[in-house]
Image: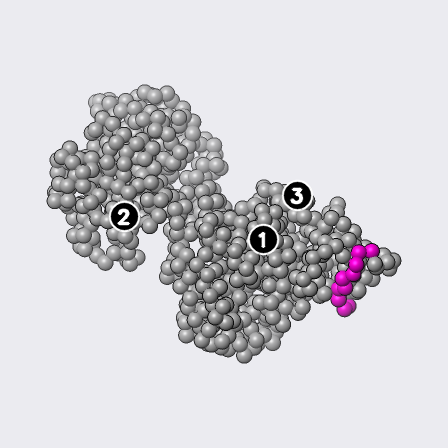
Amino acid sequence: MIAGKHLLGMRGMSASTIHHILDAAEGFRGISRRTIKKVPSLRGRTVLSVFYEASTRTRVSFELATKRLSADSVNIASSGSSAEKGETLLDTAKNLDAMQCDAIILRHSASGAPHYIADRVAARVINAGDGQHEHPTQSLLDLLTMRQCFGKLEGLEVAICGDIAHSRVARSNLIALKEVGARVRVAGPRTLVPAELAETYGCEVLPSIAQAVDGAHVVMALRLQKERMTAGLLPSLREYAIEFGINARVLARARPEAILMHPGPVNRGVELSSDVVDGPRSVILDQVENGVAVRAAVLYLVLGGEAA
Amino acid sequence: MSLLVRNGRVVDPATGLDGVRDVLVENVASSAARIEAPGSVKPENHEVIDATGMWVLPGLVDLRAHLREPGQEYKEDLVTGATAAVAGGITTVVAQPDTKPPVDNGEIVDFVRRRGEAAGLAKILVAGAITAGLKGEQLAFIGEMRRAGAVILSDGDTWVRDAGLMRRALEYASDFGLTVMTHAEDPTLARGGLAHEGPMAVRLGLRGIPSVAEETAIARDLALAAYTGAKLHVAHVSSAEAVEQIRIAKKRGTKVTCDVAVHHLVLIDEALSTYDTSLRLSPPLRRSRDRDALIAGLVDGTIDAVASDHAPQSVLEKDLPFIEAEPGAIALQQLLPLCLGLVADKRIDLPTLVARLTLGPAGVLGAYAQGAGALAAGDLTIVDPDSEWLLARETLLSKCMNSPFVGRTLRGRVECTVVRGRVVYKRQNA
């Protein structure tokens, strides 16, 4: 279980732990739907969010989760912090630790950054996304959403489409989905799908988005960063949308009951056509709602609580 | 006073000797060593070292160490570098020119050489820059540097990207009998990379450096070496295909030599799983099959030398998230024990290994090696092959401790190092 431990990634997390966290999240989801959205579970505890990268969904949902559990929260963004004065990540972390916080939520552009500070601080470290490595709470909220839609995770066919190479969401999901017994197929332009992906994760790499979507329960699109164009990995957004984007025609190849997911923020008209984002299969906003519940569950469990 | 080393297992690739002998180094002035039957030299009038049960090797020659002086003395200087070298049994070190300022003119060559001589420990030889300021734009003052004593040319950890300039560098260097050492890595393929492009880099979310970044660079440099007939040395070969490229080029008669950095002989990319920044190396650690090919190349002589590629980095460059850390690891003190692990694992026999640590690298330097690499030169390393020791902060003599082996026990310890017939290192309590 994860009680009293850091949450650095999905690697090494057992299926039973994953389901345990999702069960706890279901409990916290009810709290968010009440008029009085607050329970005293973490009263008196201090949670620091340190975000070295821009984030809306993750940062806000962690903050709401913290507040709904009655913990005290402080948010630090890299602008306006000592990172701008040249303080190292470790020094920042040690200083925050010296203020006796219970948990540090870290978003950082360097893969491995939370692992690097985890060994050196007394507080529990929760990875809110590190470079191109892992984003465990996103994976957990994705799994929660899938489990709600299908009642199970085992045996689901999940298609992850797009920029796999630069995606921490894809990596965490590839690990977690395999652990819970789902089958993952991926597809995207060859410049954005590492050659060693199948060998690394035991997933299936298919030559086209259409083939990956074929018969899938879950279609997950990933955000395409505009920097990929300047890095010479793709010729243009327009061409990406035509060749690798997911529209209603592509989505029709999935199962009738299939759901469409995206970790956000969506580039409408690029990786997803606008109509499918708003369409009946889209569970993108359910993912966002589940984000608060999953992060509440993670904070609660990491800080030593029992399952709600 | 002369020095008598008695009854050790003497391995001298220059003469093909591997047997128990006495070694007599007549005196410091001539520093010529003679090999004698055990017990045949009377111990009177000699400083005597009993090497029973130990191995007596020619002093090791290291083609590549970043000694950081001038400019980055907080990482290392020529004295601490030379101190660590002799404690590792290395008697000749080629200092890389990527200092601040870089070694790209005669005055700085002279400065480094004199500082090395003043330290009076290992022989510090100097690699001069290929291009001015290591910038890859125009030739450095190659003639002037040779006149000041430079023994080889190198642009440190930078590849000369401009093929036309590299061609001229090879041609011009050959006028002065200098070999050009290339850090073969095409930056357009390696840019931003942190680890070998393979499953481990994918898993860790680190941008990959593909083997082909090295192989395309080697292919170009081999073609230029063949075309100009000049001497090329490929530094720290790391991939299986690169070893094969050089094997073929050697068969075709291209004047090429190469070395492998010690860490690539003993580690693979799988070790990176903990984001240990001391494993961020340039070139990156590659896969198991690459390591196997490197060992095979070392055995068959495709690879001429093992280099330390000693690259001290302080906590300011290493105690950081992996992607922010600078590449490199220290290796002068660990070079021999790490290599001896390959002998213990029966991957290479001792005389062949010793050749790649002595005669091989000396051969790359040619006449500029000043006889190093053979026992007759009076540089010796005496090693206790069974002694185990802990590589720890207290035992490290470098100013930095960026080694993946810190905290590990190594087997095989240098007991005594002799340079020009003079004992420059003796282990405490030995």
Q: Are marks 3 and 2 on the same chain?
A: no
Say the numbered circle drawn on residue B61.
none
State whether residue A283 is above or below residue A212: above
- Would you say A136 lies left or right of A211 here? right
Are tags 2 and 1 found on a single chain?
no
Circle 2 is placed at which residue position? A163
B348 sits left or right of B159 in the view: right
Q: Which residue is mark 1?
A: B348
Residue A3 visible in the current orientation = yes
Give the SS element for disc 1.
loop
Q: Assess whether residue A8 is covered by the magenta stretch.
A: no
Q: What subunit carries mark 2?
A: A
Label 1 or label 3, whichever comes before in sequence order: 1
- Residue located 75% across and 64% down the image: B33
Query: Tag 3: residue type?
Result: Glu
Residue range in magenta is B29-39
In depth, the one of B89 and A36 nearer the eye is B89
Cα–Cα span, label 1 and label 3? 20 Å
Between marks 1 and 3 in the image, the one whose residue lies nearer the viewer: 1
Q: Which residue is mark 3?
A: B388
The answer for how far apart the CA atoms under marks 3 and 2 are is 49 Å
Q: Residue at x 46, y 66 (%)?
A: B248
Rendering coords of residue B416 (x, y %): 72, 53
- Crowd rating for badge 3 (residues with CA inside 10 Å; few <14, some 14–19, many 20+): few
Q: Residue at x 61, y 42 (%)?
A: B409
Please, what is the three-letter code of the amino acid marked with disc 2? Asp
Most common secondary structure along the magenta stretch: loop
In which chain is the residue bearing label 1? B
- Give the crowd class for mark 1: few <14, some 14-19, many >=20 residues within 10 Å: many
Residue B116 lies, in percent from the top left, at 65, 63
Chain of residue at mark 3: B
Q: CA distance from mark 2 to mark 1?
A: 45 Å
